[in-house]
Image (cartoon, helix red, strand yellow):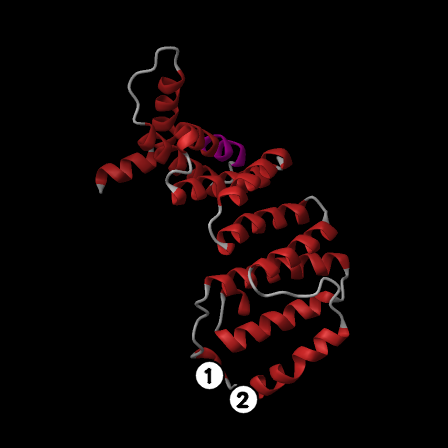
Amino acid sequence: QEHQDDTEDNIFEIVSQLNNNFEAPEPSFVDRTKLSELNLMAGRKAKKAAAFQASFKYFRTAIALHGQAIWSDYLTGLDLHLEAAESAYLCGDQAQLTQLVEQILKHARTAVDQSRAYEIKLRALIAFNELDAALDLGHHVLGILGVPLQRNAGIVQGLALLPSLLIRTAQLDEARVNQAKPMADPRLLAAMRVLMILCQAGYLTGSRATGIYILKMTQLSLRYGMAPESS
């Protein structure tokens, strides 16, 4: 435990020295897997400190250390690419973000894993003020997750959601809300995150569909349990 704490405290110095050794003309023996793990640790620590350029460099190095075998360990490949994609977005590097998201989508095995990449892309589109593109993509992702919504949803679709919501809401009291089961389905949890992002894009564009997103989140919460976005 003490050794691990020392490593975390000095992670930047340790990784910098090991990376330099690895990149030297005649590098000494390096355990690539271990060095990749250390770069991942350094990248996360740098990102937490809002040093996004540094974090992106660490994540890219972690990916490069695995070479062509990066996706042979699916979870490692996925985690590294998601971390790198988020850092690229935070750095405002659209080209790198696009490449990383494409790699994730190429190898993703589930709709939820695809959604994790798309969520980063959605936040980036909003940050770059490409709001219509964000709305289009968000609806595409909801379809992938099995929670489709019409792109131009309006009053009619909102009215269709209201009766069941009013009935379920009338049956609730504060005690039941506090004791409500948590939402467990990963696809629905992902859909809630996407709907929350769509609420932001809809608000910024003045879209009438924003109310539909809120109603849909309410419907999912009442039917399947509370998610972090339910409040």
User: Residue 71, which numbered label?
Assistant: none
Residue for badge 1: 176
Amino acid at dot 1: Arg
For disc 2, the neighbor class at 10 Å (few under 14, some 14 to 19, many from 20) is: few
Q: In this view, does 215 lie to the left or right of 116?
A: right
For the N terminus, give its image quadrant.
top left
Q: Is residue 199 magenta?
A: no
Start-end of magenta stretch: 52-58
Distance from Cα at disc 1 to Cα at disc 2: 9 Å
* Residue 38 visible: yes
Q: In this view, does 35 lie to the left or right of 228?
A: left
Work out whether residue 3 or residue 22 is closer to the camera in this orientation and state it. Answer: 22
* Residue at 51% across, 86% down: 173
- The residue most toward the top is 25
Q: What element carries label 1?
A: helix
For the C terminus, give its image quadrant.
bottom right
Dots 1, 2 in contact, CB < 8 A:
yes
- The secondary structure making up most of the magenta span is helix
Q: Is residue 134 left or right of residue 183?
A: right
Residue for badge 2: 171
Work out whether residue 58 or residue 160 is closer to the camera in this orientation and state it. Answer: 160
Residue 160: x, y in percent? 69, 79
